[in-house]
Amino acid sequence: MRTPQLALLQVFLLMFPDGVRPQPSSSPSGAVPMSLDLQPGTVGGTLQSSSEATATRPAMPGISTVVPTLVTPSAPGNRTVDLFPVLPICVCDLTPGACDINCCCDRDCYLLHPRTVFSFCLPGSVRSSSWVCVDNSLIFRSNSPFPSRVFMDSNGIRQFCVHVNNSKLNYFQKLQKVNATNFQDLAAEFGGESFTSTFQTQSPPSFYRAGDPILTYFPKWSVISLLRQPAGVGAAGLCAESNPAGFLESKSTTCTRFFKNLASSCTLDSALNAASYYNFTVLKVPRGMTDPQNMEFQVPVILTSQANAPLLAGNTCQNVVSQVTYEIETNGTFGIQKVSVSLGQTNLTVEPGASLQQHFILHFRAFQQSTAASITSPRSGNPGYIVGKPLLALTGDVSYSMTLLRSQGNGSCSVNRHEVQFGVNAISGCKLRLKKADCSYLQQEIYQTLHGRPRPQHVAIFGNADPAQKGGWTRILNRHCNISAIICTSCCLIPVSLEIQVLWAYVGLLSNPQAHVSGVRFLYQCQSIRDSQQVTEVSLTTIVNFVDITQKPEPPRGQPKMDWKLPFDFFFPFRVAFSRGVSSQKCSVSPVLILCLLLLGVLNLETT
């Protein structure tokens, strides 16, 4: 039914003065005009306040044009209505049961208006909208089938706008290709100041935004500080204490501490003491720093595990903190609601050059969300893999990220391993120190070091594969060393290298391709050693190689063109006929016309 739309166009054309035409405008992604709807058949004359809609485009001669935008309040709450419909597929929802930062379509964020918390919305997480606006005085009655609203521009002129159903705006946009020629231009066009001044006098914000440092308060000393998450720096991975924890940034870090005199540091170093990780409160919102002693803004840190104070007993430092895990529950713009911490402790032997490796984990989830839903492993794509995300492996019913060898500062193999990132070729190596043992033990130990524990059995075909559905996983092919090729009977064949070969391809539409894994193979390289040889150190290497096997379709081709070729003397009778006299020409008109008609008929039959 197109009658209402045609009627609206007739109203526009009849009531426009000369030189006036409607100006289309597109609202930014996520910016929605907040005004009363004019349903079909209602009079368009409702006055809106200037705080609900602002003009963002210059006025044209004869008519004021506006772009409907949303003015975010200084202290928004979660009662703001989200006017965008929910997207059927949320491509940026990579963490099941948890909120992904800047993913405005993630249902796990429990945010009615995500833009109040997120600094921006990821591409594909919101719908685009387009508006066509004219002066409201030109419209007497709206009979448009599309939503219509009245806005107020910066000049105080009311504008009547119709929301156009433009489906082309809701398709994914292609990202710009960056190369050496346009890198500087793009950086100058879209770049800004790299650092902000630390001397800021404005009042603290009303709520946390994604990535903001989390404020803490020590009541004993009346000191405001930041929640720290130490991270490793340098080749040795030394602990950097000044690394702040970011709001809504769930991540884990690992670092190493070295002690010159562990006997004195055992009870004096606060990093080893469990109490230093929960003897403070967390500010619910940043504006709490203006009145930190107000209990309304303070969230206590709840200890959920057993924690004892460090104790030096003989040659052993007991109850040293080895792992810290924070669980933080948030409620959108209302801030942090609950903080809990669990600690892991170990014992260290007092000796010269003693070291300790610590793990720090931060996990954010929505307030009152079940813990079982929050421990689900994150996705590497939805559905297709995203370049740089972990390659998912499966052993039994447990999924995890495939890993590579990682070396410590002295070159020996570390317990912590590198993640295999999809689409990123990598090579790593380390030295494995072994004790004297039989051949079977050496082979088993080296194999486990190369492929990690547990041994990967399957690889996810897509980035959102479910461990419970075996059809979404492909089995890993293994190619071991050829033992029969070894002639020596008193030799031991040990693996020294593992190459992980991953075949992948794009599937789906060319406008929105999805990467999937077609097959994976483990290729081992071995060397032989004699049983009598004293093996103390073996150099191991792991290689990851991604091979793109995408078969792109042939480009579309147009219809073939007819290439007519006539004999060289085809027009000879015509030239002879027209070269004669006037009398002869009059007599030859009929045969010439007959030949032309026959020729045209043949051509028409060939083309049809």
Image (spheres, helix red, strand yellow):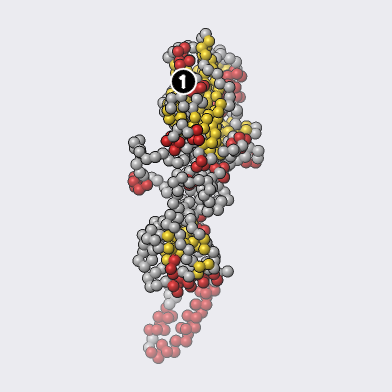
Depth order, front residue of 525/444: 444
Residue 487 horizontal/vertical position (percent): 58, 20
The extreme front residue here reads: 294
Residue 577 horizontal/vertical position (percent): 41, 84
Residue ID at (49%, 12%): 350
Q: How many marks?
A: 1
**Relative height, residue 575 to residue 222 (above, below):** below
Residue 300 horizontal/vertical position (percent): 52, 30
Quadrant that contains the N terminus: bottom right
Judge the density around disc 1: few (<14), some (14-19), many (≥20) Cα neighbours within 10 Å.
some
Question: In this rendering, does residue 522 appear at all?
Answer: yes
Give the image quarter of residue 213.
Answer: top left
Residue ID at (36%, 64%): 60
Q: Regarding mark 1 in the picture, which secondary structure is present there? A: helix
Q: Which residue is mark 1?
A: 270
Residue ID at (40%, 63%): 157
Depth order, front residue of 485/510: 510
Residue 330 horizontal/vertical position (percent): 53, 38
Please give left or right for residue 73 compared with residue 528 in the image: left
Residue ID at (65%, 40%): 469
The extreme bottom residue here reads: 583
The extreme top residue here reads: 314
Name which residue type carries label 1: Ser
Quadrant that contains the C terminus: bottom right
Question: In this rendering, does residue 277 appear at all?
Answer: no
Please give left or right for residue 236 compared with residue 607 in the image: left
Depth order, front residue of 103/274: 274
